[in-house]
Amino acid sequence: MSQFVTGQRWINDAQLMMGLGTVVSVAHRTVSILFQSTGETRAYAKESAPLTRIIFKPGDEIKDHKKRTLTIKAVDQARQPVVYHVITEQGTTELLEECNLDTAIQLNKPLERLLSGQIDDLKWYELRSRTWLNLLKNHNSGIAGLTGARTSLIPHQLFIANEVASRYAPRVLLADEVGLGKTIEAGLIIHQQLSTGRARRVLIIVPEALIHQWLVEMLRRFNLFFSIFDEQRCLAIIESTDFSNPFNAEQQIICSLDLFTDNPQRFEQVIHAEWDLLIVDEAHHLGWSTEQVSEEYELVSQLANISKGLLLLTATPEQFGKESHFARLRLLDADKFNDYDRFIQQENQYQIIADLIEQINADQPLSDNMLSQLRALESNIDVEQVKHATLSAQQKNEITHHLLDCHGTGRVLFRNTR
């Protein structure tokens, strides 16, 4: 057990910012320490006090209570409290009792703590070491960010979340049938993107009637704290803070499109705030046709262009027709999906591509007709190997991915049916 003497200087290991404390009284089992920088006096049990004795060494630079910088020449520990022989900036020698040291001295740097003898027990070092190793293990896990949801995951939800969330700035269309959990899939993707640092600023746009449902789902299932933004909230932020753009005041925001259609100024502000991930629910209600584009669609289109990642939650492609489906794909990749007539022509080949991929992965020889179709689609594929079904697993995987990426919607559409 440490020997405490009135006037000695000690530091609290757990709260280094409190600076040097001074022993003001010593009882049989307790010791009272005054931390003048905070004005607090704390009592500690002698046997378990989280305190370290501070004694400086010759050559150290210190400050006294007058803020003078002094250099220690010698230390007299024969009597307690300690007396320092110091050299002033003028070169004179003085005696300085440790009780007159500056209280603002802090030992935050590892070297300072080591040289001052402020060393933890081995058990605390081992605890920190194990903690960092576990954090590293979790960070490098293939399912990092996908295991904390308070819900029973269905296999297709976990597959989609893992496939999408592992991408940098994902831009995808989630078009599952009603009731298959698109909101949970989106929540998993958001959670994983935030957990891994791929995204920091997230904007969710939903119909007015679904705002609180999304807020509760994100908090209850994923422990994600979103802020609801409406006109009243925006005005309050501008009036009570230094933010001229209210959308810079929060990192994770939920709002409706009505906020922007009713107030063009708010849309200008949200456009000039940087977003890592934009989520739009009920995206099939955004009106678009080759003859006319709705105001809501145009607003989302501009937001989609400035956002790095984009998730569109929508009905199945068949429900609202091919034109509506093309409009949503256009939000994801305006360069690829820029011509509706060309899109229709490409869509007519989707069944051919699906049949080719199915035959290739089933190790079944292709008919002459299918080989001709494959040659027409891709001239770089070794047709002879495909013809005789002698492809390795890696080759089949490469061909499959190549056909998916170069023909059709690629990997931007995820759709599950019952």
Image: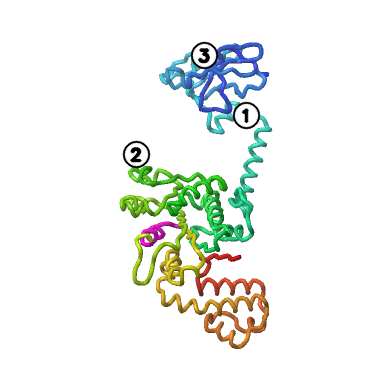
Q: Which of marks 2 and 3 is nearer the N terminus?
A: 3
| Residue at which label 2 appears | 242
Q: Where is residue 255 in the image (x, y as percent from the top left)?
A: 42, 50
Residue designated by label 1: 119
Secondary element at image label 1: loop
Q: Which residue is at a point 43% across and 77% down the rendered structure image?
A: 342
Q: Magenta stretch: residue 365 in it?
A: no
Eye-nearest disc, 1 or 3: 1
Residue 13, position as x, y percentages in the image: 58, 27
Quick check: 127 left or right of 14? right
For marks 2 and 3, give the CA distance. 47 Å
Give the image location of residue 103, x and y in percent.
49, 20
Whether label 1 touches label 2, CB < 8 Å: no
Answer with the quarter of the image where residue 373 lies.
Answer: bottom right
Q: Is mark 3 on a helix, strand or loop?
A: strand
- Mark pair 1, 3: CA separation: 24 Å
Q: Nearer the viewer, mark 1 or mark 2?
A: 2
Residue 95 is tagged as none
Quadrant where the image shows the N terminus? top right
Residue name at image x 63 percent, y 30 percent = 120
Q: What residue type is labelled 2?
A: Asp
Q: Which disc is residue 97 wearing?
A: 3
Direction from residue 234 to residue 398 in the image, left or right: right
Q: Which of marks 1 and 2 is nearer the N terminus?
A: 1
Where does the magenta region start and end?
297-308
The answer to which of 196 and 129 lies nearer the viewer is 196
Where residue 168 sits: x, y (%)?
Answer: 51, 58
